[in-house]
Image (cartoon, rainbow, N blue to C red):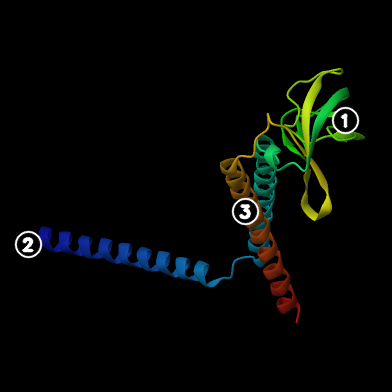
Amino acid sequence: MRDDDQRRAERRRRMDELLAEAEANVARTGAAKSQPAPAVDERRGTAWGSALGVLILLVLAAVFGMLAMTAGRFTGPDYGDASRRGTAIVEQCERRGPITWEGFGYYHACTVDITWNDAAGPRVVIDDPGYFKGEKPGDKIEVGQNQGTRGAVSYSRPEVPSRGWVTAVTVLFAVVAFVCIGAVYLFLRQTIRDLRRSRA
């Protein structure tokens, strides 16, 4: 009988110890949760994350913008719509690239002397990426004069046809680039508003 009583007493004492330890742990956890986290560290973490997000969006906008310009090299004004046609003699060329404001890859900007079918023409520099296909000084090419946007003059070739699907891909890349820039603008606008509210 005494052994059973001792065992029960030992179990009860052990249960009380475990219960007291559990209550102490719960009290410690509750006290830790009730203390506010350091606001400076939280803001710093949020600021770094936001800055990284803005940087990623800006890089994506630049990449998709450059891809749009690069894809645009594979299409050009329609030679069939040219208001004038003639020949041009390549005088000199300059190789540009691999990364420029005109997109990715190398291209040539060449000075040409144009002679229209109905009259003498100008001496111009054509620096449209994708216009020249490896021509060297002295080479003769067919050229057409097209009306560009806002009264500008553009030049076409039969070898660089107008391709609608390439234009669609170019527009798609440009739209993605503008969406990224728009997201950055909206984020920065909201951040500035939040800063003004917190200071008021």
Tag in front: 2 or 1: 1
Tag in front: 2 or 3: 3
The answer to whether residue 63 is above or below residue 187 is above
Report which residue position mark 2 lands on. Answer: 1
SS class of the residue under badge 3? helix
Q: Position of residue 105 (x, y in %)?
A: 72, 30
Q: Report the disc number at residue 30.
A: none
Of the pair 114 and 100, the residue shown nearer to us = 114
Report which residue position mark 1 lands on. Answer: 115
**Mark 2 nearby-residue class (10 Å; few <14, some 14–19, many ≥20):** few
Please give the name of the residue rendered at 73% of the width and 24% of the height, measured from the top-left corner.
Answer: 133
Q: Position of residue 158 (x, y in %)?
A: 69, 31
The answer to whether residue 157 is above or below residue 21 is above
SS class of the residue under badge 1? strand
Q: Residue furthest left?
A: 1
Q: Position of residue 76 (x, y in %)?
A: 69, 39
SS class of the residue under badge 2? loop
Report which residue position mark 3 lands on. Answer: 175
> Which numbered disc, 2 or 3, marks the residue that appears first in the sequence?
2
Q: CA distance from mark 1 to mark 3?
A: 39 Å
Q: CA distance from mark 2 to mark 1?
A: 124 Å
